[in-house]
Amino acid sequence: MAALFAAVMLLSAFPAAAEQAYTTYTSEALRLSFQVDAGYSVTERDGYIWVYPGETASNFRLTWAEEGDVNKEDFFAQTGEALRAAMGGSMVYDPGTQSQPMDMRGIPMDAMMYAYTDAQSGQIIEGAYLWEQREGYSILYGAAYIPAEADAVLSGLVLASQTFSPVAEGAQEKVPEGGALSEWMAALYQDCMEIAQATAAFARSYQASVNNADTAYAAEMQAYAALCREKLEKVSACRSALEGMKGMVSGGEGAFQYENALEACRIAESLLAFYIGYYDSSDPLGAYQQKAAQGMYASEADSLNAMYIAMGDVKENYQALACPPAMTQTWPLYIRQIDAFQEKLYADYKAALLDDALMDFSATQLLMRQPYLMLRYEILMYAVIEQQFVNLANMLTLEDDTGEQQIWVDYSMAEEIYPNLYPSMDSAVNLALSTDAGKTRLLVEVEIEGFSQKYQRTVNVGPEITYLMIKPPAMSGLTSLGSGRETQITLRVTQMDTGELLVAESKTITLHSIYDFTMLNSEFGVIEPYNLLAWLRPDAEEVLALRREAIYWLETNAGAGYSSLPGYQLAYPDGTDEPSTTVLQAMAIQGAISDIGVRYNMGPYSFGGSQRVLTPDAVIQSRSGICIETALLMASALQSAQMHAMIIITPGHAQVALETWENSGTYYLLETTMLPYNATEEETMPFARFLTADEWREYLSGDGVYVIDCDLAQTLGIRGLA
């Protein structure tokens, strides 16, 4: 839920205490209006008004009768008698026939309350609240709390002329009359088409809402999730009924359609249950939002901590879901994006606690990035759901198994490859496979000529969509990537039992140089300044050799007590404080870069488009680098010494920010183009400048500025080819 995550992130600016908010719902059909908590959603269908408070196991149904239609005393007396008769000893609270004063969102009411427990588990399986409004209408209201452990519930609605009965919630009116196979299949077909159409419509609306940075999607998503719940109940009922017919159709007329219908039910149940679980998994964030809006957190730190925990809970919920085969590759990639949101929270926390201007800037960049990356995975999920239900509908129209099996293949291929960004790509080929009925074995082969090894995989494919994100491993020892060229990406899909070649496509694509950099993420269509992280090489042999040279430089220039690069540890002679320890190491690295002969190349640099950027090892080998290249070399060496560096991009220039000590929240600005560097006082002052938080804010205030936190490489999954 990209938009939900983004909306919650905006609350990381600590909210002021707020009074409880209510919203008014008006029903034209029932000619009334009432207030509910602003966090609740209200929908009207089937003659009832349903109020969802955002708790996964709760739902409320309301109906109205005009005043005078129901006598209050008779109503309470009859209802109480019916409840006691239905529940017997499992009723844990019985107020008799007495109403009790209550308050429904500011509207005074009378009520009678009951609660029931399951005889086996002892869990409360339903509480009934019967309220009378004193504003001209009588409200007859039932509230059901249904935990996962409950194996029975009662209908939640009671009128004066009705009694409770121990039947499953929503069991009525969800199956066709008669129960004939053809009727079940017709009803299932209709449900599949309805889900497919609703999915396509919601996906369009959701994408537009995220792109517009609004929350218009929320009510529609809730309605879509409610539809999925409704259809899951119907599909489950259909499966149960079909299983009961097994003896009547097994091996006889209609057996093929019967097996197809059962398989369609299984696939539909799995996919709907996954989506409902996905939707409900975000409840911890919704609960956080509500508490934050009510001003329930004492401090900004408390709020950020609560949000961090809520995000962790959402991630655990996601990981616990049974993932359909079509999403086994995309779902983990989607979940991983939560890590970046949590990094955003850490940056917010550090910015607030330490007045850390750079972490504040980094947090803002992450928030601008994440919703759009998550959105692409979500849109893919909706596309899979839509296509799957279209396929199931087609499957249900097959009359017999004498015809040729249909195999559906849909694919897309990359247009270009940036070799150093290749490890960070999700895929070079995306492939969706399914059949109209039955299983088949397919051989999938993908290769990028002159760049990748050959990818081969045998896949068992059936009516349930198999979605593959294919990225053939790059060849080892690539030596011909110094310049870009055109090459071929080839995809072959073969039916193994027949040898039929289903797909044989070879497409011309651009294979860029290993040094070619771009900010445009071709997979997601967003600007990705963090692509620069793929150019860091803290473990390269040349960078490790540079560290050794820096130790020699420091010992030569400062004395025997300075024979190490200790990172954020006090290891130098007494009197060398933390900031001095840090800046001495930066000076040593700059001095070593100078001593091995690297010089600043005043070549052009533009961060806005494609750019040739040498990796740190190549800079050392060539003894030359433009500003971004010397900055990446310095950052790699600092990372190698376990220090916290950031790449600072301003229009036409690149520098390095180095935190003065671990979690200090203060930084030096390093000018890495000062080559040669002899560590004179005149050179050292402009090489390493300490900026206050306000000075950093002023320095970063213009357009076209980026702050690339080097510590984010692992979290964001960005790494280079080497």
Image (cartoon, rainbow, N blue to C red):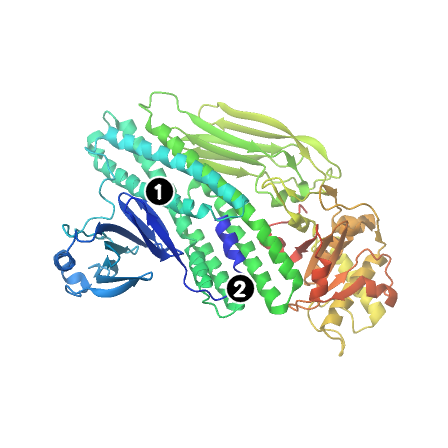
Q: Tell which tag, 1 or 2, sits nearer the viewer.
A: 2
Can residue 348 be seen here? yes
- Badge 2: few (under 14), some or many (20 or more) residues near its Cα, within 10 Å? some
Side of 66 where 373 appears, left or right: right
Q: Position of residue 2 (x, y in %)?
A: 50, 49
Q: Position of residue 556 (x, y in %)?
A: 84, 68
- Report the residue marked by disc 2: 14
Residue found at x 26% / y 32%: 184
Q: Position of residue 465 (x, y in %)?
A: 43, 35
Up/down of 125 relative to 413, above or below: below
Spatial distance from mark 1 to mark 2, Cα to Cα?
35 Å
Side of 191 where 709 appears, left or right: right
Q: How many marks?
A: 2
Side of 416 where 154 appears, left or right: left
Amino acid type, residue under disc 2 in the picture: Phe
Q: Position of residue 44 (x, y in %)?
A: 32, 45
Can residue 377 be seen here? no
Amino acid type, residue under disc 1 in the picture: Leu
| Whether label 1 touches label 2, CB < 8 Å | no
Up/down of 81 relative to 227, above or below: below
Residue found at x 66% / y 36%: 451
- Report the residue marked by disc 1: 227
**Mark 1: which secondary structure?**
helix
- State which tag comes first along the sequence, 1 or 2: 2
